[in-house]
Image (cartoon, rainbow, N blue to C red):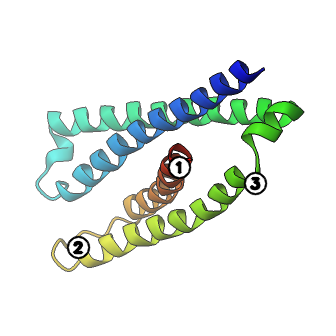
Amino acid sequence: MRQDIEKIEDKRVNYLKWYIFGFMIFITLMLVRHFFRLDGMNKQVLGTIVLGGLIISVAIQAFFVLLSALLEKDIRRNPTLKAALQNELVQSISQQSWIAAYLGAAGMTVLFAVTWFFYPLCDPVTISLCSIAMGAGAYRIYFYFRYKSI
């Protein structure tokens, strides 16, 4: 049983790592797409490549969120796994991760607010999507690094 717990824990960490990889690509490409919009990049071939990268990064994130959800469902169903992998420490880290999510979402909104003074392009869809994505990404990044440190 100990090996099963270690395998599932490795899966959890691996799924988080791949989600973070997709998230980093997504947020970078969204910011590139936003800040080079006035230069006409989105209408060029490079803009199409960036859009393709965005779609792939969203697919990566969605895939690993789904795998993580299925893994968490399995953990909750098995009392032994739940006791080992859903303990008070993991629940505490999860609760603390919400602070990082809030700060990430708020920070992204502030970034757009500050850059608006220098780059006068207000796109509420991009601002909303980036803020939501940053909140979700900050949650998972904080959880990942805190979980890895124990």
Q: Sequence-wise, which precedes: disc 2 or disc 3? A: 3
Residue receiving disc 2: 115
Name the secondary structure under disc 2. helix
The percent position of residue 88, horizontal first and vertical second, equals 75, 54
Left or right: residue 77 compared with residue 94: right
Q: How many marks?
A: 3
Q: Is residue 27 above or below residue 83?
A: below
Residue 95 vs 60, above or below: the answer is below
Quarter of the image for residue 64 reads top right
At a point 24% along the width and 34% down the height, the residue shown is 48
Q: Nearer the viewer, residue 111 or 129?
A: 111
| Rendered position, 58 above or below 11 | below
Say what amino acid the circle numbered 2 marks. Thr
Tell me the SS state at disc 3.
helix
Is label 2 or label 1 in front? 1
Measure the alpha-carbon separation of dots 2 and 3: 41 Å
- Amino acid type assigned to the residue bearing label 1 in the image: Arg
Q: Which mark is residue 140?
A: 1
Closer to the camera in the image, 63 or 90: 90
Quarter of the image containing the N terminus?
top right
In percent of the image, x 68 and y 36: which residue is there? 69
Position of residue 11 measured from the top left corner of the image (x, y, whole percent): 59, 27
From mark 2 to mark 1, how far is it between C-alphas? 26 Å
Q: Secondary structure at mark 1?
A: helix
Q: Earlier in the sequence, mark 3 or mark 1?
A: 3
Please tell me which of labels 2 and 1 falls first in the chain.
Answer: 2
Q: Residues within 10 Å of mark 1 (few under 14, many from 20)?
A: many
Residue for badge 3: 88
Q: What residue is shown at x 15% (from left), y 39% (from top)? A: 44
Marks 2, 3: nearer the viewer: 3
Q: Residue 79: percent from the left, percent from the top?
A: 88, 34
